[in-house]
Amino acid sequence: MKRVVIAGGGTAGWLAATALARQLGPLVDIALVESDEIGTVGVGESTIPTTRTFHHLLGADEREFVCATRSSFKLGISFEDWGRIGERYFHAFGITGKSTWMGDFQHFWLEGRAQGFAGDFGDYCFELQAAKAGKFYTGADGKLSYAYHLEASLYARYLRALTETAGVRRIEGKIKQVRQHTETGFIHALLLESGETVEGDLFIDCTGFRGLLIEQTLKAGFEDWSHWLPTDSALAVQTRSVGPALPYTRAIAHEAGWQWRIPLQHRVGNGFVYCSDHLSEDDAHRMLLDRLEGELITDPRLIRFRAGRRLKVWDRNCIALGLASGFVEPLESTSIHLINVAVTRLIQNFPFAGVSPAVIDRFNEQSRREAEGIRDFIILHYHLTERDDGDFWRRMRDLDIPDSLAQRIALFRDNATAYQASDELFRVDSWVQVMLGQGLQPRGYHHLARLMRPDQLRQALADISASIDRAVAKLPEHQAFLDEYCSAKEG
């Protein structure tokens, strides 16, 4: 197992190529097959903080990356009109308040609120307050937890440049046929339309929703989640910026789904996610155009998708990455994270001695649990709604949700308890912010804060809030920081 063939480029393909080349170097021979004629979906222009860790793995220079891809910084997501029309809450990165081994911060906050002196839950989160103020800073002494808004095409180009000195061989062409061994069913080569044959030992499927290798060839199977997540369409369009870049993504609910606004340095990425059962394409197109800010740069592009996961992400000698492995929806910007974590796991378990069924089973089980955890977190946003303005929201409110999510909701509702399992992406802070933001108020909570005198609790909460206010006041405006950050690089 030395020859690795990556089918497809885009974000998934080039992330895999870059990481394998940077980490395994001369131990593997990497070829990436892509065609300039085949576009990428490219709507995932928003990331989460784990991307920064993966960039360290790649040896990427942050300033170089931000400037080359015209990225901006992201401190979280503003959810607007989700619980009720006119309401807004933040899912911010970072930690809220201070927790102890006995209980998380929300228990202290709930006791402070019961005694009448606690502020809003978000008052105790540095990233949330910085986002609301439109401020940002990163550097050696920076303490914010953040991610990026990025342009997918520029990102793939940047990643490709990182591999130029690492020996990755790019092959231009369309795949005409996937050839398998007659007895084992293992893939042994890709036949291109040009007639060229690309042989390999391990194949990575980055062909998007088509799943050319993993599904069309190997029939790995697909678990459909559209009964829980029925949004199946998105219109994506780019507009010129009309103001300073905000350091957060906006997710604005509408009558049959939601729309995103992602600010970059040079433009804004816009998308209109909807359920085709409740909204026609023509109406979605009209609603999107009515709600845009700024001059159109591109025409709206329709993307169809289906929520679900590949039953076998790794099947025989093929591993699916990105959209080929499944898709939830872009609400919490998890697509790039799932690529990164799968590539990391592959590097840790690279089958130099040959494919091991035990390794495959473990890889697939971890992938399943990760995907299901993200699925539940996304469903949470829709299900915990008090909107009653259309069939779509009533449908989501009345869902028969997965047992795993129902248990989480009951645990928080009854005792304000949230948790993060070892193989889950979203932390306690994320679950608490969204559940409170969507209007789920706990009936009870741990009374550990009553071990403090009321004046001590009041002072502790006030100190946290005041220290955050002082820190935010010292930060530069996000747009001003971006302007200086990249102009300094260019200089």
Image: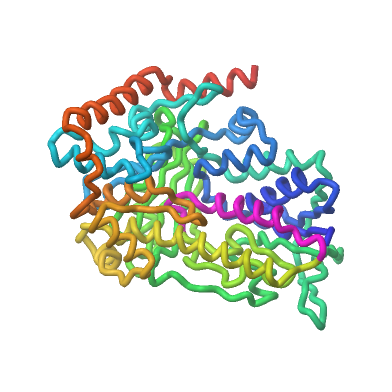
Query: Relative to 436, does residue 323 appear above or below in the rendering?
Result: below
**Quarter-of-image position of residue 490:** top right
- Nearest the viewer among 349 and 20 is 349
Task: Look at the image and tell me in which quarter the N terminus lies.
Answer: bottom right
**Residue positioned 44% across, 31% down in the render:** 245
Q: Position of residue 242 (x, y in %)?
A: 40, 31
- Nearest the viewer among 246 and 294 is 246
Query: Relative to 379, does residue 149 appear above or below in the rendering?
Result: above
**Residue positioned 51% across, 21% down in the render:** 141
Q: Position of residue 239 (x, y in %)?
A: 46, 40
Can residue 420 be seen here?
Answer: yes
**Residue positioned 62% across, 66% down in the render:** 362
- Nearest the viewer among 245 and 248 is 248
Task: Look at the image and tell me in which quarter the C terminus lies.
Answer: top right
Report the residue that reaches farthest toward the front: 451
Which residues, given as a range, are shown in magenta? Answer: 329-353
